[in-house]
Image: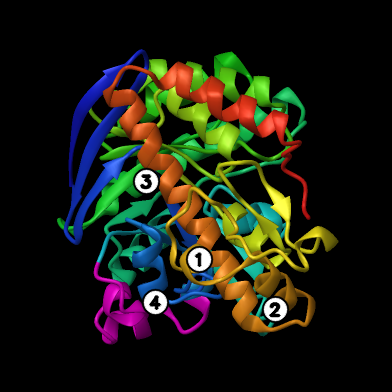
Amino acid sequence: MRFEIGAIDGAARTGTLATSHGVVRTPAFMPVGTRGTVKMVDTRDLAEAGAQMVLANTYHLMLRPGDDVVRDLGGLHAFMGWDAPILTDSGGYQIFSLDAKVTEEGVEFRSSYDGSRVELTPESAVAVQENLGSDIAMVLDVLIGLPASREDVQYAMERTLRWSARAAKVREREDQALFGIVQGGTDREFRKRSAAVTATLGFDGFGIGGLSVGESEAERNRAIEVVVAELPEDRVRYTMGLGDTKGMLDGVLRGVDLFDCVWPTRLARHGKVLASTGDYGIRRAEFKRSGGPLDPNCGCRTCMAHSRGYLRHLFLTGEPTGLRLLTVHNLAYTASLMGRIRESIESGELRSFRRATLARRVSTGSDDSLA
């Protein structure tokens, strides 16, 4: 993997991330394909919507169909039919969400599919992702929700550092990058230590983890600033689990290159439309006879071919096509937003672009709640 920085505007920068399966222009957003697919869409939809790279979930794929099965079927790219970059997470979020038993050796939990006992260690997380064959693998980390006691945050951060060192020693694939993960909650001292130590372990890039789990926007932004200051400038910085418009703008402004989140696709399945003119719910009665597109400034397949009135009808009658078309649009909106962010960095106008974008959302009453 190679990462080259392009334009710089304050702490923000554009870049080109070259992987074994293609180049990603950053800042970039990765749609989440948990089980090897982004919900409601196929890989052609993803490509047409402007996705450059997708994320797949190590925990789910190691259980169903099994990482060895994916390997034997040609690896994740062939399995998915996606000949573009893929990042796999390590299963750390599942440790958090499934209330697993965590020890110094690793983590033990019950399969959400059949209840069988499953073990995952820093070493096996790397091995599973090497079987999957993603372009970028993530180390196994310990994630905790916020707010939490300072002692618990420190304990999780220190254990993540020890696990990261173990993971770095066992990697074997030369065609797969391995990213470390910085933890530390919202504590400035812990974040600084975690970033500084992780930066010494020889990783190809760095995830900023442990955010979007209950902290405020101000706390999140301060944590990102502290971490970025400690990480090497020539490596990718990836804020995990962040994908709303304001959050990504705030992250880019502070030097973040990559984002992922279920936000655009999950909102689509709830009837929420992301738009340059402000987000809204498609269920609103005013759209019953609306012949206009979801977003007059969008050129996606959905907006070019279908009216809001039709899409409202599909959603209210429970037609799966409606969910697919809304998902395609929300992904296209997000990809377009990242493209405009890159252009604003290249022209040195990121701050003014951010102000205009957020002001427009306030003026239309846009918010981040479900429709």
| Residue contact between numbered discs 1 and 4, judged by CB atoms under 8 Å | no
Within 10 Å of disc 1 (Cα), the crowding (few <14, some 14-19, many 20+) is: many
Q: What residue type is labelled 2?
A: Leu
Quarter placement of the C terminus: bottom right
Q: Is mark 2 on a helix, strand or loop?
A: helix
The alpha-carbon separation of the residues under discs 2 and 4 comes to 37 Å
- The residue tagged 3 is 166
| Residue contact between numbered discs 2 and 3, judged by CB atoms under 8 Å | no
Q: Is residue 233 visible?
A: no
- The residue tagged 4 is 67
Residue at x 44% of width, y 81% of height: 66
The alpha-carbon separation of the residues under discs 3 and 4 comes to 21 Å
- The residue tagged 1 is 328
Q: Nearer the viewer, residue 127 or 337?
A: 337
- The residue tagged 2 is 314
Q: Which amino acid does label 3 sit on?
A: Arg
Viewer-nearest of discs 2 and 3: 2
Marked residue nearer the N-terminal end (1 or 4): 4
Q: Which amino acid does label 4 sit on?
A: Asp
Residue at x 38% of width, y 74% of height: 43
Marked residue nearer the N-terminal end (1 or 2): 2
Residue at x 72% of width, y 36% of height: 364
Identify the magenta region.
62-83
Q: Residue furthest right?
A: 285
Viewer-nearest of discs 2 and 4: 2
Viewer-nearest of discs 3 and 1: 1
